[in-house]
Image (spheres, grey):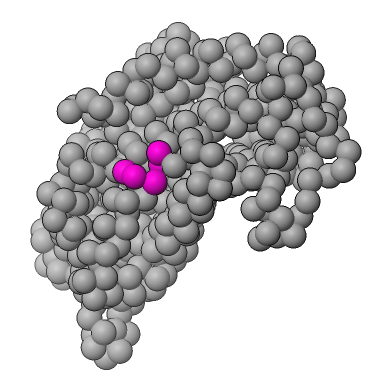
């Protein structure tokens, strides 16, 4: 099966496998460090309750067979350990069949987490990691030449990711069509980063150039991925540069980094040699074992069959964004920011130790790790790490319906100083004794001007809109969540 060998993609395969393993490592660490407050038995949306009302067929997960918080933690830490080992080269140190089992095990473990993750795992990059992770099972290791068909499937994934995002924008908000969306986006995106203020303050003509460049990268450049080299490599390089721009301008978990990893797989060894000075090993295999080739052919046929609905979705006037068409997340639809908010709203949670609420009650603000809160605090860089509660708080500010499944449990956890829930926050103003009451306020936030930044030493200016949730004590919140 020599025709299956992409001998010119040795380093592209290397970048893809190591990159996917690195993203898996981040994803498993996110799950291990956050799940107890979000999904644990005493968390905001407990997994045992979810399992009681869902089926294995609809949400395949090993946790349907057995669940405890300790077992979930063990799966997370085992996944992190295997991912780290694959980053360091374990996949090339074991036989090909063993490497495939390691990759398959990671995919099963993360699929099991995503399928019980409920609203906390409803992001497009979860499906993206699962789809890329299943590709990794069939990428092979140092025992075989890179399989051409699987590398082409990686390009197909990258194409759907970029082209789908471009189409959803053109079909969505008018500001993408008149090139004005970035007048607002850097300020209203879910979790701004340390450079977002500066991006927002760029001249408006440059913002229009940004949008135009985005449209070119997402609507025209993706077709170059299937052209001969060096055109395919140039197309991938343009995508890498664009994604690095997005990395610098905000926090989007591992979406941008995994896109970069997929684009690196398009570069051939000539490009890697020119940029990094690395050459293909002299003893690199130039063929694909027959048994492995048969598996690659079967996998390719499966992906082509499953691609029918995602492909139709690209050209549908009712295009779905960040959707999966099967419970295994094997071939998915992608897209982001079909609409852009023009105003930023934030939910601010406060507590008090007063037993009776009055106009003179002293309220103290809870701080989150990533989302805007204290106007004087510079936005932090968190990506590729994903702060799931902070992201859901952004959605909650857009509509209370997003918060309905968990906001009551969050307030209940704060009123009892639930250790696992409080750990999800950046600052607890009641470290020794829980508050008697908590409330949530809705604010309008905007980036300060340059003059305000220098004079007030504040990155944000905020104005109170009103109550998001009125003050509640432990008894009332207990009735609220029952």
- Residue 462 as seen in the image, left or right of residue 243: left
Q: Nearer the viewer, residue 246 or 398?
A: 246
In the image, the segment drawn in magenta is: 219-223
Residue 327: which quarter of the image?
A: top left
Image coordinates for residue 135, horizontal then vertical, percent = 59, 27
Q: Is residue 46 visible?
A: no
Q: Vertically, is 379 above or below 350?
A: below
Residue at image coords 47%, 58%: 241
Quadrant of the image for the C terminus? top left
Q: In this picture, is 29 found above or below 175?
A: above
Q: Nearer the viewer, residue 105 or 457?
A: 105
Q: Main secondary structure of the magenta part?
A: helix
| Residue 391 % position (x, y) | 36, 48
Q: Residue at x 17, y 42 (%)?
A: 172
Answer with left or right where residue 206 lies relative to residue 380: left
In what quadrant of the picture does the N terminus appear? top right
Count of numbered badges drawn on the protein: 0
For the point 48% across and 35% down, the residue is: 226
């Amino acid at each position: 099966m020599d025709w299956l060998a992409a001998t010119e993609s040795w380093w592209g395969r290397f970048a893809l496998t190591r990159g996917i393993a690195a993203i898996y490592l981040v994803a498993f660490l996110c799950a291990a460090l956050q799940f107890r407050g979000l999904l644990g038995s005493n968390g905001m949306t407990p997994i045992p309750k979810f399992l009681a009302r869902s089926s294995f067929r609809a949400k395949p997960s090993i946790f349907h067979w057995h669940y405890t918080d300790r077992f979930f933690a063990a799966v997370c830490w085992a996944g992190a350990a295997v991912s780290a080992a694959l980053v360091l080269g374990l996949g090339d140190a074991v036989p090909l069949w063993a490497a495939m089992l390691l990759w398959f095990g990671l995919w099963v473990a993360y699929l099991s987490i995503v399928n019980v993750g409920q609203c906390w795992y409803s992001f497009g990059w979860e499906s993206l990691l699962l789809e890329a992770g299943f590709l990794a099972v069939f990428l092979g290791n140092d025992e075989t030449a890179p399989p051409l068909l699987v590398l082409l499937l990686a390009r197909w994934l990258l194409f759907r990711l970029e082209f789908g995002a471009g189409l959803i924008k053109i079909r969505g908000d008018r500001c993408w069509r008149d090139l004005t969306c970035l007048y607002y986006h850097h300020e209203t995106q879910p979790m701004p980063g340390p450079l977002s203020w500066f991006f927002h303050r760029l001249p408006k003509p440059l913002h229009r150039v940004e949008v135009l460049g985005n449209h070119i990268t997402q609507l025209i450049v993706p077709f170059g991925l299937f052209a001969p080299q060096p055109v395919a490599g140039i197309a991938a390089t343009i995508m890498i540069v664009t994604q690095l721009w997005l990395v610098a301008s905000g926090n989007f978990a591992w979406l941008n980094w995994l896109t970069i990893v997929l684009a690196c797989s398009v570069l051939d060894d000539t490009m890697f040699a020119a940029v990094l000075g690395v050459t293909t090993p002299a003893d690199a295999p130039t063929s694909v074992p027959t048994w492995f080739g048969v598996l690659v052919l079967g996998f390719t046929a499966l992906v082509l069959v499953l691609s029918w609905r995602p492909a139709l979705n690209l050209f549908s006037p009712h295009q779905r964004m960040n959707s999966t068409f099967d419970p295994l997340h094997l071939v998915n639809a992608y897209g982001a920011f079909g609409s852009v908010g023009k105003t930023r709203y934030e939910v601010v949670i406060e507590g008090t130790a007063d037993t009776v609420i009055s106009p003179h009650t002293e309220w103290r603000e809870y701080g989150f790790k990533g989302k805007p809160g204290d106007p004087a605090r510079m936005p932090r860089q968190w990506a590729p790490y994903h702060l799931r509660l902070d992201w859901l708080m952004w959605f909650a500010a857009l509509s209370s319906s997003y918060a309905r499944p968990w906001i009551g449990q969050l307030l209940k956890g704060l009123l009892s100083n639930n250790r696992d829930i409080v750990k999800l926050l950046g600052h607890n103003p009641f470290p020794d004794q829980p508050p008697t009451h908590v409330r949530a306020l809705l604010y309008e936030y905007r980036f300060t001007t340059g003059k305000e930044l220098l004079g007030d030493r504040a990155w944000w200016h905020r104005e109170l809109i009103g109550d998001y949730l009125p003050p509640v004590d432990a008894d009332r919140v207990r009735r609220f969540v029952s």
